[in-house]
Amino acid sequence: KGRSVNTMTTKETELQREMHEMAQETAELQEELSAEKNRLTGELQLLLEEIKSSKDQLKELTLENSELKKSLDCMHEDQVEKEGKVREEIADYQLRLHEAEKKHQAVLLDTNKQYEIEIQKYQEKLSSKEECLSSQKLEMDLLKCSKEELSNSLKATTQVLEELKKTK
């Protein structure tokens, strides 16, 4: 029995020593676990802060993007409106230019007709003057012929008179 008690006491001492070692290991593991938990909690907190910061940045960027889209839409609408006005102005100028060209053509045609009428009048006057000159030339030729005939007749009469004077 003494040996068995002794063996039991040795085993109990050994068990107590093993339990003490296990308690120390458990305490160390708990400290490690606590340190790891604290480290992970810190990292998790940093990650949560980063996520929150990223969400805030995303909100800001989304808002800025939305504002830029609105601004771009407004600019696009303004551009489309300005292009429409420019097209209208161009169409208006083209219409006015076309009307001005038509008026100019009408004025040119009218002026050309007036010049043609004036030219025709001058041609008629010229023809009339040429006819008048022709008839005057003809009359002058007739007068020259008559003058020559009279002159010849006068010479003949003068000769006859001289001969009659001589015969008398």
Image (tube, rainbow, N blue to C red):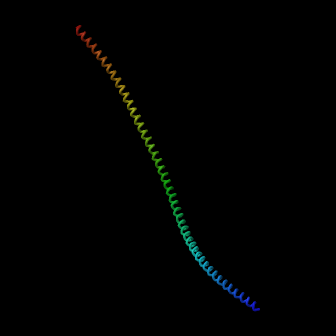
In this view, which residue lies farthest toward the right?
1
| 32 and 144: which is toward the camera | 32
* Image quadrant where residue 131 sits: top left
In the rendered image, the quadrant that contains the C terminus is top left
In the image, what residue occupies the spot 68% across and 86% down?
A: 17
In the image, what residue occupies the spot 66% across and 85% down?
A: 20
- The image shows residue 17, relative to residue 88, as above or below, that is below
Q: How many marks?
A: 0
- The image shows residue 30, relative to residue 146, as above or below, that is below
* Image quadrant where residue 11 sits: bottom right
Residue 89 in the image, given as x and y percentages of width and height = 48, 53
Residue 156 in the image, given as x and y percentages of width and height = 28, 13
In this view, which residue lies farthest toward the bottom?
2
* Image quadrant where residue 14 sits: bottom right
In the rendered image, the quadrant that contains the N terminus is bottom right
- The image shows residue 31, relative to residue 144, as above or below, that is below
Residue 103 in the image, given as x and y percentages of width and height = 45, 45
In this view, which residue lies farthest toward the top?
167
- The image shows residue 39, relative to residue 81, as above or below, that is below
Residue 99 relative to residue 166: left or right: right
| 166 and 61: which is toward the camera | 61
Residue 13 relative to residue 124: left or right: right
Residue 3 relative to residue 57: left or right: right
| 132 and 32: which is toward the camera | 32
| 27 and 70: which is toward the camera | 27
